[in-house]
Every structure is written in structure tokens, then in C-alpha cells.
């Protein structure tokens, strides 16, 4: 199963749900094992007079190592992007020849789309997935928008518009070496009430763009001067994009993404806590220190499955060791 191959919205959603479900299930098993270990340690600490199965340091060491390995597997899975493939949809929009495909190539660091100085080069949308400032992004290059008699180009232009309608954010590009044209204005009007960043490109040639006029269409913080050719200003774009995203201003239709990014963070947190437990064991610190590290991992994983820690441990000690009964 691959999210990219999911052609329809329904199958894509199903794919995501299955993925979510299978991750939760795996995390649930990890937690179960952690709970067992914590219960054993706590029982040994709290009720030394009872005959509690004694977990040896080396057995715990092995079990924790195996847990770390399994968490890292899940993280690998996250890193290959299957979880985060359906990230923020960012669409590069603009009239022909402003440098849209050049920007896509620069961001991906590969010659993904054809670039020429002939307006109307890109005829169809080009989609790729990338990590942009740590945020999973589906970046879409589009055919330059203009009135055209060419039947194929016309379809492409129509598709560009549709794509922009569905975008979480639009990167609208204009050419700084030319004054604003009616084509630019038409697109600016189109993006006016949409979340967008205006990229003034080709600043290595000239800047003929009236800044005040652009401010009529967006907040000035969303106007960024770049040169794709000289690779300048892209850092500012990344910065602004991150600001908008983390400020909650970019609304993804896919709330699942956020939770997946969160899942990933929680898995990392759990792995870190377990690594600390390993060190604790290696340095032969008292058992309650190990328990603390394990509980931290348990609580991080609980953020994914929606379980809280407190009562669980007590319950587990009683069910497993039948203490105090
Ligand atoms: N001087 C300069 N030229 C650039 C810059 N960015 C792109 N170009 C050139 O502008 C021309 C058009 O670039 P493309 O990336 O194909 O433009 P596009 O917007 O994708 O064009 P369409 O696909 O026709 O809509 C090419 O010759 C690029 O090399 C820039 O920052 N500075
Ligand atoms: Mg192009």
C-alpha cells in the first residue's frame, strides 16, 4: 500500500486510516510490554517482602534494547515519508515564464520539471513531496496561467486554477524584471482571499514591481523577494512558511498530518527515554531510576494511543502480582 498510489480521495483516506490504526496497534503492544516491566520493578521496590519475579538487569537491558529497535523501525517508517506524504499542499502559481518550474527544481534540488525561456513550457501539473523547514509538503508546479488558443495549454491552465482552489497555501510568483501585467493582476485578484505568499522572482535582473500595489493583495510579510537563478531569498520563504504553519495559519484539510507529526515526536521522545534507561542500567543505578525512564517512555507512547499512565501501573502491579489481596 502506498499513499502516493491512492488515486481517489476515498482510498487515500482509507490508506491513512489503516496506517494510523496499524501504528496505534503497534504502539499499544510496546506500551503493554513497558507496563509489564514497570510493574515488575515497582512491585520489587514497593513490596520487597513479597516474592516478586526478579527482573535481572541483563534481561531488562535486552527487553529495552528490543523496544528501542521496534520504535526506531516505526520512526524509519515515518521517515520514508509514508506517514507524512499527505502534507501541506503548496501550489506554485503565476503567469508563464516567471520561474515556477525553476523554483520547484531548486526546492527539490533536482531537474524535476522542464525549464525553458519559452512561455507555456509547463503544460501539466508536476507534483512532488518534500520536507520544507521540517514540514511535510506536497509541492505542485503548475502551467503558467494566461489566455491561450492552444487546446492543450488551455486544459493545463484550467488544471492550474483547480489546483490553486484546493491548495492549503499558494506561492504566487511574479517576474521582477517586468512591470505588473494584467495577467499578474488577474492572478493576484484570485489569490486575494486565499492563504498565499507572493514571490517576486528574478530580482537578479531588476525590480520593476510596485511594492505598495502588491500590498493591496496581501500582508507585506507575505511578499518575498527571491532569485531562483542565484538562489537568494529561499531562506526567507522557508522562514515565512514555517511561521504561518506553526502559527496555525495554514489550515491543512488533513488534520491527520499534524497528529502524525506529533506521533513522530512522541516516538522520538519514547526512544530517548529508553536510551536513558539503558544508560541507567549500564551504570547500575537503583531500579527506581529505571522505572522513571520507562514511565516517561510509557507516557510519551500514551500520547499516541490516548492512554494515561497513573492508574495503569497500579492496576498492572495488582493484576500481575496479586499484591495486597
Ligand atoms: N534571470 C533569472 N532568470 C530566471 C530566474 N528564474 C527562472 N529564470 C528563467 O526564466 C525562464 C522561465 O523559467 P521557468 O521555470 O520555465 O518558468 P515557468 O514559470 O515554469 O514557465 P511556464 O512553465 O511557461 O509557466 C527560464 O529561462 C529560467 O532559466 C531568476 O531568478 N533569474
Ligand atoms: Mg514551468
Image (spheres, grey):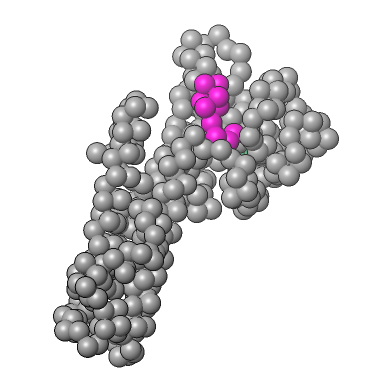
* Left or right position of 86 against 286: right
Residue 314 vertical placement versus 205 (above, below): below
The residue lying toward the viewer, choosing from 70 and 242, is 70
The residue lying toward the viewer, choosing from 324 and 186, is 324
Q: Position of residue 195 (x, y in %)?
A: 63, 34
Q: Residue at x 33, y 58 (%)?
A: 75
Q: Quadrant of the C terminus?
A: bottom left
Q: Is residue 165 magenta?
A: yes
Q: Is residue 150 visible?
A: yes
Q: Position of residue 39 (x, y in %)?
A: 26, 73
Residue 118 vertical placement versus 236 (above, below): above
Q: Is residue 186 magenta?
A: no
When asked about the image quadrant of residue 276, the answer is bottom left
Q: Position of residue 70 (x, y in %)?
A: 25, 63
Q: How many marks?
A: 0
Magenta span main SS: helix
When asked about the image quadrant of residue 95, the answer is top right
Q: Position of residue 93 (x, y in %)?
A: 59, 30
User: Which portion, as a residue range, is magenta?
Assistant: 161-170
The residue lying toward the viewer, choosing from 18 and 325, is 325
Q: Residue at x 29, y 56 (%)?
A: 27
Q: Residue lying farthest front?
A: 325
* Left or right position of 158 against 239: left
Q: Residue lying farthest right?
A: 212
Q: Residue at x 63, y 48 (%)?
A: 247
Q: Is residue 210 visible?
A: no
* Left or right position of 232 against 218: left
Residue 74 vertical placement versus 38 (above, below): above
Q: Quadrant of the N terminus?
A: top left
Q: Residue at x 44, y 51 (%)?
A: 261
Amino acid at each position: 500500500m502506498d499513499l502516493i498510489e491512492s488515486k481517489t480521495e476515498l482510498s487515500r483516506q482509507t490508506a491513512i486510516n489503516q496506517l494510523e490504526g496499524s501504528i496505534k496497534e503497534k504502539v499499544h503492544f510496546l506500551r503493554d510490554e513497558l507496563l509489564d516491566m514497570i510493574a515488575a520493578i515497582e512491585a520489587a521496590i514497593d513490596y520487597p517482602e513479597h516474592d516478586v519475579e526478579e527482573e535481572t538487569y541483563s534481561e531488562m537491558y535486552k527487553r529495552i534494547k528490543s523496544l528501542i529497535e521496534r520504535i526506531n523501525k516505526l520512526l524509519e517508517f515515518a521517515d520514508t515519508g509514508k506517514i507524512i506524504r499527505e502534507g501541506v499542499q503548496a501550489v506554485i502559481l503565476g503567469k508563464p515564464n516567471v520561474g515556477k518550474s525553476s523554483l520547484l527544481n531548486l526546492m527539490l534540488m533536482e531537474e524535476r520539471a522542464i525549464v525553458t525561456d519559452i512561455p507555456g513550457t509547463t503544460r501539466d501539473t508536476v507534483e512532488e513531496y518534500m520536507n520544507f523547514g521540517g514540514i511535510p509538503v506536497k509541492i505542485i508546479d503548475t502551467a503558467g496561467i494566461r489566455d491561450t488558443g492552444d487546446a492543450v495549454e488551455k486544459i493545463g491552465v484550467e488544471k492550474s486554477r483547480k489546483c490553486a482552489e484546493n491548495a492549503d497555501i499558494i506561492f504566487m510568483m511574479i517576474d521582477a524584471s517586468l512591470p505588473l501585467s494584467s495577467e499578474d493582476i488577474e492572478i493576484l485578484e484570485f489569490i486575494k482571499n486565499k492563504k498565499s505568499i507572493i514571490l517576486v522572482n528574478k530580482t537578479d535582473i531588476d525590480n520593476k514591481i510596485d511594492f505598495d500595489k502588491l500590498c493591496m493583495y496581501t500582508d507585506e510579510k507575505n511578499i518575498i523577494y527571491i532569485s531562483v537563478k542565484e538562489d537568494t531569498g529561499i531562506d526567507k520563504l522557508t522562514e515565512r512558511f514555517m511561521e504561518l504553519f506553526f502559527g496555525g495559519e495554514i489550515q491543512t484539510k488533513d488534520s491527520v498530518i499534524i497528529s502524525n507529526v506529533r506521533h513522530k515526536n512522541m516516538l522520538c521522545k519514547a526512544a530517548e527515554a529508553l536510551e536513558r534507561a539503558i544508560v541507567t542500567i549500564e551504570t547500575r543505578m537503583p531500579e527506581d531510576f529505571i522505572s522513571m525512564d520507562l514511565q516517561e517512555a510509557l507516557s510519551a507512547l500514551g500520547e499516541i494511543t490516548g492512554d494515561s499512565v497513573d492508574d495503569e501501573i497500579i492496576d498492572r502491579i495488582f493484576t500481575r502480582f496479586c499484591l495486597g489481596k
